[in-house]
Image (cartoon, rainbow, N blue to C red):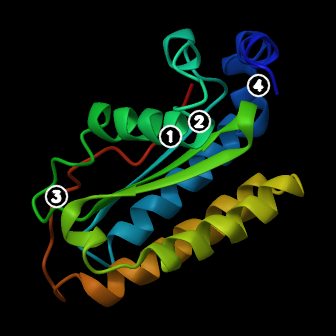
Amino acid sequence: MNKLLRIFKHRWMDRSDTLRAVPDDMAERLARRVAASEGRHTGEVRLCVEAALPLSYLWRLGPETGLPVVVRDRALTWFGRLRVWDTEHNNGVLIYVLLAEHAIEFVADRALSRRVSRAQWQAIVDRLASRLRAGDFEDGLTQALEEVSALLVERFPADAGTVRPNELPDAVVRR
């Protein structure tokens, strides 16, 4: 896709597209699933669904900086903005979906990324992408959340009987 068409596509999409993909009731159910997940492990999970990239990211697109790099950079920006990196055990994960490009990125903090291979993350991304292409946002995001939770439970289980604070909001970020 040429750069001008891509810019137009991204400028055309907005938060209303995100709200159609993830309406309020779905966002509430997903937030409850995040909270339930976090009761079983010491990690923190954030879901972020964004309609389109800001213009500043789109201008960076070129032969040497392809779309995957720019999307990854945007996911890393959200990872920092949402403070996923700032958890006690350094085991937070961001599930980022960019609607305009049908792109998905998982960003895991350092303690978690050392214990989960790129292939494992990619397998979850591939399954989520398949569900999203079929228009099955809620089940796709739920399945991805369950798979991420299983990885966190295996590697960072919650201590039985210990109540730990919720370090980050459970709400889905929709932009």
Please give the residue where the numbered disc 4 appears in the rendered image. 17
Label 3 close to label 4 by CB (< 8 Å): no
Q: Mark 4: which amino acid?
A: Asp
| Residue at 52% over, 63% down | 33
Between the C-alphas of marks 4 and 1, the distance is: 23 Å
Q: In front: 120, or 37?
A: 120
Between the C-alphas of marks 2 and 3, the distance is: 40 Å
Q: Mark 1: which amino acid?
A: Val
| Residue at 21% over, 49% down | 85
- Residue 143 spot, x, y in % from top left: 64, 71
Q: Mark 2: which amino acid?
A: Gly
**10 Å neighbourhood of mark 3: few (<14), some, or many (≥20)?**
few
- Which one is in front in this view, the residue at disc 3 or the one at disc 4? 4
- SS at badge 1: helix
Q: Does label 4 or label 1 sit earlier along the sequence?
A: 4
Please give the residue where the numbered disc 1 appears in the rendered image. 69
Q: Does label 2 or label 3 sit earlier along the sequence?
A: 2
- SS at badge 3: loop
Q: Does label 3 or label 1 sit earlier along the sequence?
A: 1
- Residue 137 spot, x, y in % from top left: 75, 53
Q: Does label 2 or label 4 sit earlier along the sequence?
A: 4
Label 2 close to label 4 by CB (< 8 Å): no
Please give the residue where the numbered disc 2 appears in the rendered image. 66
Looking at the rendering, in which quadrant would you find the C terminus?
Answer: top right
Q: Does label 3 or label 4 sit earlier along the sequence?
A: 4
Please give the residue where the numbered disc 3 appears in the rendered image. 165
Looking at the rendering, in which quadrant would you find the N terminus?
Answer: top right
**10 Å neighbourhood of mark 4: few (<14), some, or many (≥20)?**
some
